[in-house]
Image: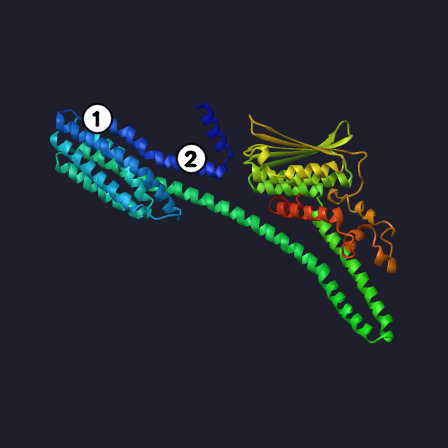
């Protein structure tokens, strides 16, 4: 039993706050008829005195009220779905509940006529106990004004019926007032809860749409940059290649001109390659200050109180880039795998200034670490390239997740973006042509430096690990764009 309870508690904690609020609201609506029923029906039993017939009528009212409560659970579920636009109205169930309510009123009128009801408040308490089930379902199916008007007329009819069977005016007045109040509560309470759930769903859909639009906007920006960089150069390459082919067809007189045109084509292709690499690198680079500002903007927009503490001096580019990726992945995890209300990001020095330390801490963790995907694994690989370490721990008691990255400030590979640490390392495999200064025929046969990796693909040398790393980084960036990559750019100006 204890194990079952813990399993249910864990399952509940993994649900999002929206799911928890919707589930608790539904159960509150479903349970309200039972609360009214158990509160009001004992008043009838204590007020009736008599032999078999009065006791039989009292038992009948108890059974009919219980049946209405049972039917109200399904009726409220269908009625709430109908109000939210997800299903048909429970009209047949409502008719059955109305018939049962009518029979209960008739039995109560018989008790009043027999003079067996000794307390003037008993009829009002019967209405208090049995009416909420049918009025709640009815209130979800009609407009509030129409429902209030119809139920007021119904209460007037019930009051007239009780007066006709001999009920005195104090009891009539109390019955009418209680009946009207219960009727109005039945109309407006479930509709208010349904409206609340509809607003929550609309806000959730708006956030999802905003995230998709942000991703689409970033892709459009990236495609526009590539078009601006590559489009003109490709057009020039196509025209010059066509011209070179026509010159070569003229024979010896056009060979020199064709060679000149192809040399220009080669130069334009090299320039285009460099420009494309700069665009891609700019898209992949993670600036620490930019990522901190973007993470704070995105998290605060999601309702998370994000606080940033910086007590460090200027760090090398390689360290800032690596920590920027930690901030990006950490903010993504907060949005995807937690229902956080606060997040603290601290950047400082450790071990007497020998290391750079970044620590992210957030509450509201609802997914175990084993289910958090491969983001942390990718971060460890990035930090390993600069001799850094990454640790992640989760406190079960407080549901707090802590991410800590530590990078030595002295030693380790030098350079800029951690994601590009292999830019020139693998190019050395094509050694034999020197640096990027090689041009002309030498550049044709032995393109060197960073160009050897890509150009060598056409020459049969293979793309090598460099291209694999670029593809992996591009896929990671595309996956993170919805939460942090875009937010980092839109909030880059919000420096603390």
Side of 159 where 395 appears, left or right: right
Which percent across, then down, holds residue 247?
A: 81, 73
State whether residue 181 appears in this view. no
Q: Residues within 10 Å of mark 1 (few under 14, many from 20)?
A: some
Which residue, given by chain and number where applicable, does mark 2 sit on? 24
Could you say which quadrant of the image residue 259 lies in?
bottom right
Side of 441 where 332 appears, left or right: left
Tell me the residue at 83%/52% (across/down).
Answer: 448
Tell me the residue at 67%/54% (across/down).
Answer: 222
State whether residue 10 appears in this view. yes
Colouring scheme applied when the structure was drawn: rainbow
Question: Quarter holding the C terminus?
Answer: top right
Q: Nearer the viewer, residue 299 or 64?
A: 64
Which percent across, then down, holds residue 78?
A: 35, 43
Pick whichever of labels 1 and 2 is earlier in the sequence. 2
The label shown at residue 45 is 1
Label 1 – label 2 distance at C-alpha: 32 Å
Could you say which quadrant of the image residue 330 lies in?
top right
Question: Quarter holding the N terminus?
Answer: top left
Which percent across, then down, holds residue 308?
A: 65, 35
């Amino acid at each position: 039993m204890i194990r079952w309870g813990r399993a249910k508690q864990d399952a509940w904690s993994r649900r999002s706050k929206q799911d928890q609020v919707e589930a608790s609201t539904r159960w509150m609506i479903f349970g309200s008829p039972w609360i009214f029923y158990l509160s009001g029906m004992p008043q009838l039993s204590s007020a009736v005195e008599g032999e078999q017939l009065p006791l039989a009528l009292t038992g009948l009212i108890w059974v009919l009220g219980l049946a209405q409560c049972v039917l109200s659970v399904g009726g409220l579920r269908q009625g709430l779905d109908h109000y939210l636009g997800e299903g048909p109205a429970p009209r047949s169930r409502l008719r059955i509940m109305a018939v049962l309510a009518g029979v209960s009123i008739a039995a109560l009128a018989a008790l009043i006529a027999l003079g067996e009801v000794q307390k003037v408040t008993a009829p009002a308490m019967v209405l208090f106990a049995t009416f909420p089930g049918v009025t709640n379902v009815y209130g979800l199916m009609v407009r509030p004004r129409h429902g209030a008007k119809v139920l007021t007329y119904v209460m007037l009819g019930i009051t007239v019926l009780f007066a006709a069977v001999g009920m005195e005016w104090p009891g009539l007045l109390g019955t009418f007032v209680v009946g009207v109040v219960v009727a109005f509560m039945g109309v407006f309470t479930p509709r208010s809860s349904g409206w609340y759930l509809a607003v929550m769903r609309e806000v959730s859909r708006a956030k999802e749409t905003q995230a998709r639009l942000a991703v689409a906007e970033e892709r459009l920006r990236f495609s526009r940059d590539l078009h601006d960089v590559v489009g003109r150069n490709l057009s020039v390459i196509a025209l010059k290649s066509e011209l070179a082919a026509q010159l070569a067809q003229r024979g010896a007189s056009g060979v020199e001109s064709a060679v000149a045109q192809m040399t220009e084509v080669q130069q334009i292709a090299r320039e285009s390659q460099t420009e494309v690499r700069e665009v891609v690198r700019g898209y992949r680079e993670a600036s620490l200050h930019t990522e901190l500002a973007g993470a704070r903007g995105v998290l605060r927009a999601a309702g998370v109180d994000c606080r940033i503490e910086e007590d460090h001096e200027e760090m090398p580019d390689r360290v800032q880039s690596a920590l920027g990726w930690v901030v990006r992945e950490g903010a993504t995890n907060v949005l995807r795998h937690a229902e956080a209300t606060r997040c603290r990001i601290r950047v400082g020095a450790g071990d007497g200034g020998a290391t750079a330390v970044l620590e992210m801490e957030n509450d509201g963790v609802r997914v175990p670490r084993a289910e958090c995907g491969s983001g942390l694994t990718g971060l460890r690989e990035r930090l390993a390239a600069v001799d850094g370490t990454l640790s992640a721990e989760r406190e079960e008691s407080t549901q707090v997740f802590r991410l800590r990255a530590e990078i030595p400030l002295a030693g380790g590979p030098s350079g800029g973006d951690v994601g590009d640490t292999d830019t020139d390392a693998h190019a050395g495999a094509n050694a034999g042509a020197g640096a990027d200064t090689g041009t002309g025929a030498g550049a044709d046969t032995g393109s060197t430096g960073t160009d050897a990796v890509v150009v060598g693909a056409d020459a049969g040398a293979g793309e090598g690990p460099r291209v694999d790393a670029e593809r992996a980084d591009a896929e990671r960036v595309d996956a993170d764009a919805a939460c942090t990559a875009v937010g980092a750019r839109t909030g880059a100006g919000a420096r603390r």
